[in-house]
Image (tube, helix red, strand yellow):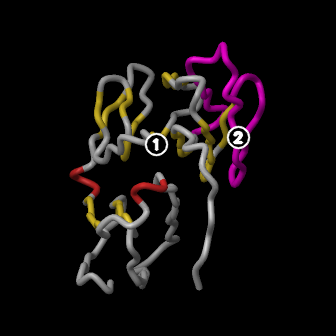
Amino acid sequence: DSAGHEGLLGPGGVQWMTAGRGVIHSELPEQQSGRMAGFQLWLNLPARDKLCEPWYRDIAAGELPTFVTAEGVRVVAIAGRSHGVDGAVRREHTEPLYLDLALPAGARFVQALPADRNAFVYVHEGSVAIAGTAVPTGRMALLANAPEADRVVLVATAPARPLLVAGRPLGEPIVQYGP
């Protein structure tokens, strides 16, 4: 990128970047075989941090905190905290939670989620049910942050690979600009 950062991500790796004052970057995916999937998520910065120094980190799959629940759910903790395990990245203002989950059919996954967080689940393989609502492959469930809520429960109706993403809203305007 324009700040001199360079990296090479392998399967399951994560790139975390803070654009800050601005950085020009590009991704050049290369596929050896099979199907490649990737996700790019953008988190807003508080207004006071918009002009911070750009920051970049590649995190190899083997460096990402990973655990398996008693029900056999594999959890990769990219950001935030899950079941006592700190993710690879933490950010104080938005407190993002970013979990890559693999649920066997019939498995249940419960994640504490304060009611003041905005959250969604995106299912990229299989299907899950949330509060009795089916969320199939390629669909996203926007979770209501109801005052009485303190968790989200996912139940795999088939082997499933969902992402669970949440964060504290900043309550500031969002302005987007780019190529």
User: Residue 164's image quarter?
Assistant: top right
Query: Could you say whether the residue bearing mark 2 is in a helix, strand or loop?
Result: strand
> In the rendered structure, which amino acid carries the disc numbered 2?
Leu
Residue closer to the observer: 41 or 158: 41
Going by the picture, which residue comes out furthest to the front? 48
Q: Position of residue 153 (x, y in %)?
A: 59, 23
21 vs 77: above or below: below
Query: Could you say whether the residue bearing mark 1 is in a helix, strand or loop?
Result: loop
Q: Residue at x 38, y 29 (%)?
A: 82
Going by the picture, which residue comes out furthest to the top? 148
10 vs 66: above or below: below
The magenta span reads: 130-159
The answer to whether one can see residue 161 in this image is no
28 vs 98: above or below: below
Decide whether residue 141 is among the magenta residues.
Answer: yes
What is the quadrant of the C terminus in the image?
Answer: bottom right
Residue with the mark numbered 1 = 94
In the displayed structure, does residue 146 sit left or right of residue 29? right
